[in-house]
Amino acid sequence: MTLLTVDNLTLKFDTDEGRITAVDGVSFEVNAGEVLGLVGESGSGKSVTAKSLMKLNPGNAIYTPESKITLSLEEGDVDVLSLKGNKALRVVRGGAVSMIFQEPMASFAPAITIGAQMVEQLMLHKTVTKKEAKAISVDMLERVGISDAAKRFDQYAFELSGGMRQRAMIAMALSTNPKLLIADEPTTALDVTIQAQVIDLMKDLVAEFHMGILFITHDLGVIAQTADKVAVMYLGKVIEYGSVREVIRTPVHPYTQGLINAIPKLDDLDAELTPIPGDIPSPLERPTGCVFHTRCPIAEPVCSQQVPEMTAFDTNHTAACIVAARQRSAA
């Protein structure tokens, strides 16, 4: 069952320097019980895309008329971008959609206990008493692997370790039983052992609650372990999309290939690191044609003039590359 459909999402920001395009024609789907990974360098538009799903972008954000975000619930479809007012937006802000942020310390209020914050948001989104909200919160803290949950309930965020704070954030996000969970780089600030625990927890949550998860990261290694499908973003555009197995094993787009080649190889410690040359351009200086052509090792003159279309390279694998599409046709 398709839970979320993003169709031709284009988002611009009005700034002092002019109007810039942050997201350009992005389309993808998330099904119930499925994890979609959103991958790309910093500045590629991942977090802006995720915040669009909850209408959390600032007031200078402009969604173009053709942009469409549809959340499919049992009660019917929700046109997210048409929602106005705090009451209407609750369905995508902690109701049917919850979000785990990259740094829990910036998300929890430092002077309010973890439990008080969990109870407050539960009473906002559900018809429960304060006692019932506490019971739900303590139970959820236990389910995400926090020991002595009743004690942690009365503690402040700064009293918890990094991994425990992240688990508390996940518990808070799950306590309202969301259909869609947005995880914005939830493992970036954690050490590798805690990362592995959080990844295993996410897998268990999908199996138990049959929710959809949009997992945002710059780490393809994490995506390979977590996601079912992956969308690779560059400068606001999805340039490769498909099943994780297809994209990781047989990447088509030079950018995806560059991301994979940049991963350190533990089986060859003498191998040199191979970063993608250059830097991601500023949205104010957006390249014409293919947005990656300024850094692409196989770029041809046509790449700077023509915007590539998404081309099917397999049943569950598409990519936007003029050169790769021509090579496939010639093969």
Image (tube, rainbow, N blue to C red):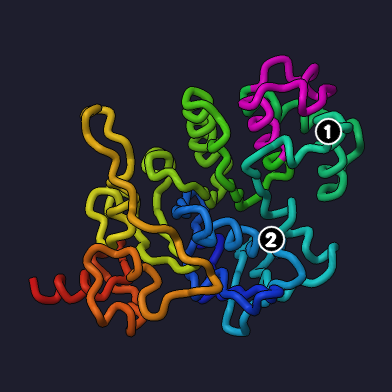
Residue positioned 77% across, 32% down in the render? 136
Q: Which mark is residue 54?
A: 2
Quarter of the rendering occupied by the C terminus = bottom left
Q: Residue at x 70, y 31 (%)?
A: 168
Left or right, 268 with respect to 161, comes to: left
The spot of residue 158 in percent (x, y) is 77, 25
Main secondary-structure element of the magenta-colored stretch? helix
Q: Residue at x 43, y 63 (%)?
A: 234
Horizontal side of 279 relative to 249 (left or right) equals: right
**Callout count:** 2
Q: Please give the range of residues in magenta.
A: 146-172
Amino acid on which the number 1 mark rests in the picture: Pro
Mark sitting earlier along the chain (1/2): 2
Q: Does dot 2 land on a helix, a strand or a loop?
A: loop
Q: Nearer the viewer, residue 80 or 131?
A: 80
Dot 1 falls on a residue whose secondary structure is loop
- Kindly identify the residue that appears in the image at 65 percent across and 59 percent down: 51
Task: List x then y, in percent, for residue 7.
Answer: 52, 74
| Label 1 vs label 2, nearer the camera | 1
User: Which label was assigned to residue 42?
Assistant: none
Disc 2 residue crowd, few under 14, some 14–19, many 20+, Cα 10 Å: many
Residue 56 part of the magenta-drawn span: no
Position of residue 54 relative to residue 244, above or below, is: below
Give the quarter of the image for residue 120. top right
Q: In this picture, is 60 found above or below 43?
A: below
Q: Which mark is residue 110?
A: 1
> Camera-side residue: 312 or 43?
43
